[in-house]
């Protein structure tokens, strides 16, 4: 065993404490996860996305419908996403084997050498579009109707009544639990001292209820030099914020007027794509007691995304990527965590991953019992 192997963080089953367990845990696949922007997958296009080390080919047929199947050809295991979309099917670039949206082999273009059409099939996944994002259900498809995508009525319905919102994403070299810790732990205000999204946070609530962890802070929200100009503090209480880790999602709420969701896509133990959605009921004209019309908010948020939201979140990205590197080098050091909410986040992540492993183990044993 070389030195690099000896210093590798332990896997989930070998972990000796909560931090090691959570940093090795995946996310339970029996939920809806966003994987791509709807606008990025045009008819006739396929892309490869990954959920916890499992590659999935996402494609849109010429009928406009999205489909998702394992990103492998059942013949020689090449990536189907590297092939072409023909009609409503996905075609392997090697031998031209053609698979439909259910993962069934639909056509083989070459000689079968006297054999019948192979009865092979790859896994398919339920797909939905909501809030401009493509969502995939990578787990037990029988649960897809039971487990719903979060409802955000404020940004749906008639355009004139929708709240202003901004959607952005990042792919960071960090475990998903580090990102979820970050977005709900306000003790890192020092990191954002330039933009000041929150300051002087005091934890007032920290409670685990089922598959949710509720957290509240008394904190000064949105005191930055630019963002603070557009918030009407006469109408909005900017001195407190409620947050929740509603597995596997995270949200925040400031006086029912400013809301936010974080949707994580776990790619592997050290890579996560995160989608951030912020939405606002209203803005005010700087220095005047006048509200900005809803259509005007869209223009402001377009600029805010570039000048404020992405730079602010980029600071979090630098921090969690550094945390990932630090964990890999010092995973066996003592835990020195002060915020009790972080322990609850981590315990929930570990429990949900254990539930998935137990379910998978039982399913595997059942399959083994019926094998010839």
Image (cartoon, rainbow, N blue to C red):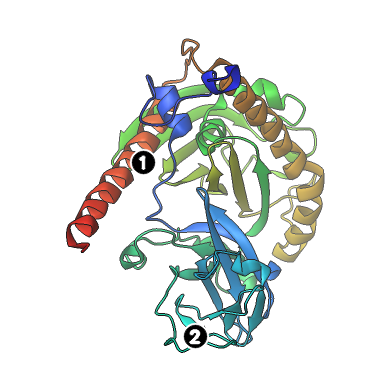
Image-based side of 361 in relation to 11, left or right: left
Q: Quadrant of residue 348?
A: top left
Label 1 Cα neighbours within 10 Å, binned few <14 / some 14-19 / many ≥20: many
Q: Residue at point 46% right, 89% down?
A: 114
Dot 2 corresponds to which residue?
A: 106
Residue 354, position as x, y percentages in the image: 31, 39
Dot 1 corresponds to which residue?
A: 353
Q: Quadrant of residue 292?
A: bottom right
- The extreme front residue here reads 113
Label 2 Cα neighbours within 10 Å, binned few <14 / some 14-19 / many ≥20: some
Dot 1 falls on a residue whose secondary structure is helix
Residue 17, position as x, y percentages in the image: 38, 20
Residue 287, position as x, y percentages in the image: 80, 42
Dot 2 falls on a residue whose secondary structure is strand
Vertical relation: 362 (above or below) 315: below
Q: Residue at point 39% right, 48% down?
A: 28
């Amino acid at each position: 065993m070389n030195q690099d192997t000896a210093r590798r963080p332990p896997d989930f089953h070998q972990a000796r404490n909560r931090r090691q367990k959570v940093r090795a845990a995946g996310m339970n696949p029996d939920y809806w996860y966003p994987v791509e922007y709807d606008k990025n997958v045009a008819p006739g296009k396929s892309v490869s996305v990954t959920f916890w080390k499992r590659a999935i080919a996402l494609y849109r047929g010429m009928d406009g419908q999205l489909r998702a199947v394992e990103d492998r050809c059942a013949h020689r295991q090449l990536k189907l996403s590297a092939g072409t979309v023909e009609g409503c099917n996905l075609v392997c670039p090697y031998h031209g084997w053609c698979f439909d949206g259910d993962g069934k082999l639909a056509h083989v273009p070459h000689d079968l050498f006297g054999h019948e059409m192979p009865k092979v099939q790859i896994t398919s996944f339920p797909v939905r579009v909501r809030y401009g994002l493509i969502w995939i259900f990578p787990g037990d498809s029988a649960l897809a109707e039971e487990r719903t995508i979060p409802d955000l009525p404020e940004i749906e319905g008639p355009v004139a009544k929708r709240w202003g919102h901004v959607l952005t994403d990042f792919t960071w070299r960090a475990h998903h639990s580090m990102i979820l810790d970050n977005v709900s732990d306000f003790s890192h205000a020092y990191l954002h001292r330039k933009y000041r999204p929150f300051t002087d946070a005091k934890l007032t609530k920290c409670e685990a209820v089922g598959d949710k962890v509720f957290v509240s802070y008394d904190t000064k929200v949105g005191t930055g030099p630019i963002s603070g100009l557009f918030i009407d503090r006469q109408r909005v209480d900017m001195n407190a914020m409620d947050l929740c880790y509603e597995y596997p999602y995270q949200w925040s709420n400031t006086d029912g007027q400013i809301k936010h969701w974080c949707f994580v896509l776990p790619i592997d133990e050290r890579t996560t794509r995160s989608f951030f959605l912020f939405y606002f009921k209203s803005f005010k004209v700087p220095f005047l007691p006048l509200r900005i019309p809803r259509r005007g908010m869209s223009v402001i948020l377009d600029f805010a995304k570039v000048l404020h939201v992405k730079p602010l979140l980029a600071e979090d990205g630098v921090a969690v990527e550094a945390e990932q590197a630090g964990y890999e080098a010092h995973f066996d050091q003592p835990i020195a965590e002060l915020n009790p909410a972080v322990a609850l986040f981590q315990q929930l992540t570990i429990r949900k991953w254990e539930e998935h492993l137990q379910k998978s183990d039982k399913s595997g044993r059942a399959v083994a019992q019926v094998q010839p």
